Image (spheres, grey):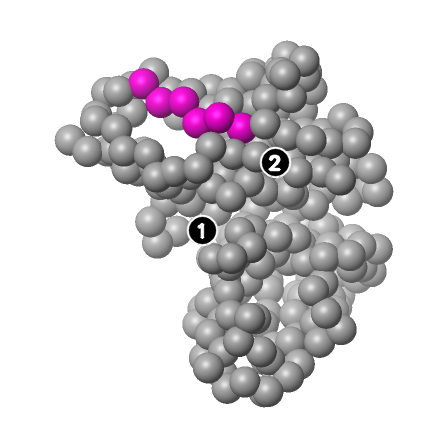
Amino acid sequence: GDSVTQMEGPVTLSEEAFLTINCTYTATGYPSLFWYVQYPGEGLQLLLKATKADDKGSNKGFEATYRKETTSFHLEKGSVQVSDSAVYFCALSDDQTGANNLFFGTGTRLTVIP
Amino acid sequence: GAGVSQSPSNKVTEKGKDVELRCDPISGHTALYWYRQSLGQGLEFLIYFQGNSAPDKSGLPSDRFSAERTGGSVSTLTIQRTQQEDSAVYLCASEGQEKYNEQFFGPGTRLTVL
């Protein structure tokens, strides 16, 4: 079955540090891959996505590249800010049945300290 | 409305009671998803609607859970004879054709079963 394995947190970084959150997946078909973010007190928001191999999703300085050979979709940011403190979820959808229901990783809590 | 809304935002109930959770998707979105976020299970898919029909009910954890959608818009998730393990945040998301494969999440309903 489809699943996502995500680096467990929590992760604490100083402002301007480099961020990597690892994510690998298992899927029967050709999934689309996503990173969702949940800021404190807010709902889940799509951060970025990639729909096919070698695609790079990017938003707000975050990037992730769809690597089919390593079944990975690691999230990176070159210089984090305090405002990036949130919980990050890697997810996939596998449109085998016509539905795009998401399979989520367990989430990684990031805290950025000034 | 501008986004997905859910009500109530919080619900506290006694074990054995029935509860109804409501989701108002973004106007015009044909696809609607229910997820559950709990400490033990993370984020898990419950059910998917395309229009008023639910082709995928595979994620419903037991026959105490049911959902319906009317008029291709509002959806209600019903939990009968609630148990303590039903305590979680229930999230609703909708998806439209203009941004296919991108789900917009509501703020969730936090259910606590005493």
Q: Residue furthest left?
A: A114
Return the chain for callout 1: A
Return the residue nearer the eye: B83 or A51: B83
Q: Please check the rendered image and state whether residue A54 is part of the magenta-colored stretch, yes or no.
A: no
Return the residue nearer the eye: B33 or B85: B85
Determine whether, in the image, residue A58 is placed left or right of residue B57. Answer: left
Q: What type is the residue that disc 1 sits on?
A: Gly
Q: What type is the residue that disc 2 sits on?
A: Val
Return the chain for callout 2: A
In this rendering, the answer to whether B1 lies above or below B8 is: above
**In which image quadrant can residue B36 be found?**
bottom right
Q: Select label 2 or label 1 by which is in front.
A: 2
- Residue A39 spot, x, y in % from top left: 37, 45
Q: Which mark is residue A43?
A: 1
- Residue B93 spot, x, y in % from top left: 60, 52
Kindly check if marks 2 and 1 are in contact, taking CB atoms under 8 A apart as contact: no
State whether the magenta stretch is mostly helix, strand or loop. Answer: strand
Q: Please check the rendered image and state whether residue A20 is part of the magenta-colored stretch, yes or no.
A: yes
Q: In the rendered image, is residue B1 in sight?
A: no
Range drawn in magenta? A18-23
Marks 2 and 1, the one that precedes in the sequence:
2
Q: Residues within 10 Å of mark 2 (few under 14, many from 20)?
A: many
Determine whether, in the image, residue B15 is placed left or right of residue B77. Answer: left
Label 2 to label 1: alpha-carbon separation: 20 Å
Residue at the image position 59 percent from the left and 87 percent from the top? B16
